[in-house]
Image (tube, rainbow, N blue to C red):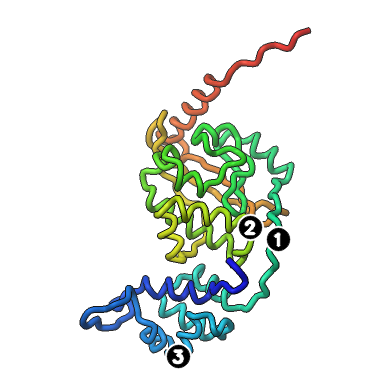
C-alpha cells in the first residue's frame, strides 16, 4: 500500500482477466495461457498501441486521457460505478501522506434517532464498522452492535455467515461496495489493517478482493435465516448521514402485513422478554 502502488494497473489487469474472448467478440482458437483477454487484444479493441497498454498495466504511465480510460471501460465491460472508479484512478490525484486513523464519530442527533426507532437500524462507517446500533438490530444479529465490523463478521464469524442463505452473493456485493467506499485512499492504516487481516484469514475475501469489483451499496431486499424466527425478507434502506462523510444510516423494514413483519414483531417481543429486569433503586 505504499506510494509506489499501482492501483490503475492492478485494476485494469484484474478486469481484463474477467472478460472472455467470446464476450469481447474475439474468436478463441487453440490453448490460451491467460484467463480472459490478452493485453494486445485489449489494446486493439480500445484503439491504443499494445506497448502503451503494457505501460499502463505496469504503472509506467499513470495519467492516461479520459478518452483512453473510457475506451478501456467499454472493452472491459465496466458499468457506470466501475467506470467512474477507473476514471478516478487515472485522474492523477496527489497521494496523501499516511496518517493516524481518525476515529469516526456519529453525530449525537443521529445516535439518538437510531435509539428511538422500532425497526432494526445501525450506522455504518466508511470501513463498514458499526458505529451505533439499536436493540432491534442486535436482535437480528448479536454482531450488530457498536464496535463490530461488518466485513470481518460476515467473513470470519460462522454464526454471522449462517444468517445469510445467499452468502456468496451477499459477500460479493459487500466487497464491491467496500472498494467503492474506500476509493483510492488505500494508505489509510485502518484500511491496511482490515484488508490485511481478511486476506490472511479468508481465502474467499482474498479471491473477491483480487477481482477489483466496484459497486455502490444501495437499498435492496435482504434475505436472512434467523435462528429464532426463521426466514426473513427485509427491505434495506441506506441513507447518508449529513455532516459525517462516509457514514450511512441503515434501516431494515419488512413489507406490511407479511410473514416477515409478524416475525420481526415476534423477535422484538422475545428480546424484550429476555432482557433482565432492573432492580428498583434503594430509597
Whether residues under marks 1 and 2 lie with C-beta atoms below 8 angstroms apart, the answer is yes
Number of residue marks = 3
User: Residue 27 occupies which quadrant of the picture?
Assistant: bottom left
| Mark 3–mark 1 distance (CA, rounded to whole Å) | 37 Å
Q: Looking at the picture, does residue 55 appear above or below residue 33?
A: below
User: Residue 263 occupies which quadrant of the picture?
Assistant: top left
Front-most of 247 and 104? Answer: 104
Q: Looking at the picture, does residue 148 appear above or below residue 6?
A: above
| Mark 1–mark 2 distance (CA, rounded to whole Å) | 7 Å
Q: Looking at the picture, does residue 82 appear above or below residue 207?
A: below
Q: Sequence order check: which comes first, mark 1 or mark 2?
A: 1
Q: Residue 78: x and y, percent?
A: 44, 72
Q: Sequence order check: which comes first, mark 3 or mark 2?
A: 3
User: Residue 62 occupies which quadrant of the picture?
Assistant: bottom right
Q: Sequence order check: which comes first, mark 3 or mark 1?
A: 3
- Which structural element holds mark 3? helix
Q: Residue at x 54, y 70 (%)?
A: 85
For this orientation, the residue located farthest to the top is 283
Whether residues under marks 3 and 2 lie with C-beta atoms below 8 angstroms apart, the answer is no
Residue 133 located left or right of residue 109:
left
Q: Residue at x 61, y 36 (%)?
A: 117
Q: Residue 147: x and y, percent?
A: 61, 41
- Which structural element holds mark 2? helix
Q: Residue at x 39, y 89 (%)?
A: 44
Reading the image, the residue beneath label 1 is 99
- Please rate how many residues cluster around mark 1, counting C-alpha atoms within 10 Å: few if below 14, some from 14 to 19, many from 20: few
For this orientation, the residue located farthest to the right is 283
Q: Residue 178: x and y, percent?
A: 53, 57
- Which structural element holds mark 1? loop
User: On residue 51, which mark appears?
Assistant: 3
Reading the image, the residue beneath label 2 is 189
Amino acid at each position: 500500500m505504499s506510494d509506489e502502488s499501482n492501483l490503475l494497473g492492478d485494476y485494469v489487469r484484474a478486469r481484463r482477466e474477467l472478460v472472455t474472448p467470446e464476450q469481447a467478440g474475439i474468436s478463441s482458437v487453440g490453448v490460451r495461457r491467460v484467463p480472459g483477454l490478452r493485453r494486445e487484444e485489449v489494446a486493439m479493441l480500445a484503439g491504443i498501441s499494445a506497448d502503451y497498454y503494457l505501460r499502463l498495466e505496469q504503472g509506467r504511465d499513470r495519467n492516461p486521457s479520459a478518452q483512453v480510460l473510457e475506451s478501456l471501460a467499454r472493452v472491459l465491460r465496466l458499468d457506470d460505478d466501475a467506470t467512474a472508479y477507473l476514471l478516478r484512478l487515472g485522474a492523477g490525484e496527489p497521494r496523501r501522506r499516511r496518517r493516524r486513523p481518525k476515529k469516526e464519530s456519529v453525530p449525537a442527533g443521529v445516535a439518538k434517532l437510531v435509539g428511538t426507532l422500532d425497526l432494526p437500524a445501525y450506522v455504518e462507517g466508511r470501513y463498514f464498522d458499526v458505529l451505533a446500533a439499536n436493540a432491534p438490530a442486535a436482535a437480528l444479529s448479536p454482531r450488530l452492535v457498536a464496535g463490530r465490523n461488518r466485513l470481518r463478521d460476515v467473513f470470519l464469524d460462522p454464526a454471522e455467515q449462517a444468517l445469510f442463505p445467499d452468502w456468496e452473493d451477499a459477500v460479493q456485493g459487500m466487497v464491491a461496495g467496500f472498494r467503492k467506499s474506500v476509493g483510492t485512499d488505500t494508505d489509510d492504516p485502518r484500511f491496511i489493517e482490515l484488508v490485511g487481516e481478511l486476506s490472511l484469514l479468508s481465502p474467499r475475501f482474498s479471491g473477491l478482493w483480487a477481482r477489483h469489483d466496484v459497486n455502490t451499496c444501495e437499498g435492496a431486499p435482504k434475505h436472512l435465516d434467523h435462528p429464532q424466527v426463521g426466514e426473513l425478507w427485509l427491505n434495506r434502506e441506506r441513507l447518508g448521514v449529513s455532516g459525517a462523510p462516509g457514514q450511512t444510516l441503515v434501516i431494515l423494514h419488512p413489507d406490511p402485513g407479511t410473514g416477515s413483519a409478524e416475525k420481526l414483531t415476534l423477535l422484538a417481543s422475545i428480546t424484550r422478554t429476555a432482557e433482565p429486569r432492573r432492580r428498583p433503586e434503594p430509597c
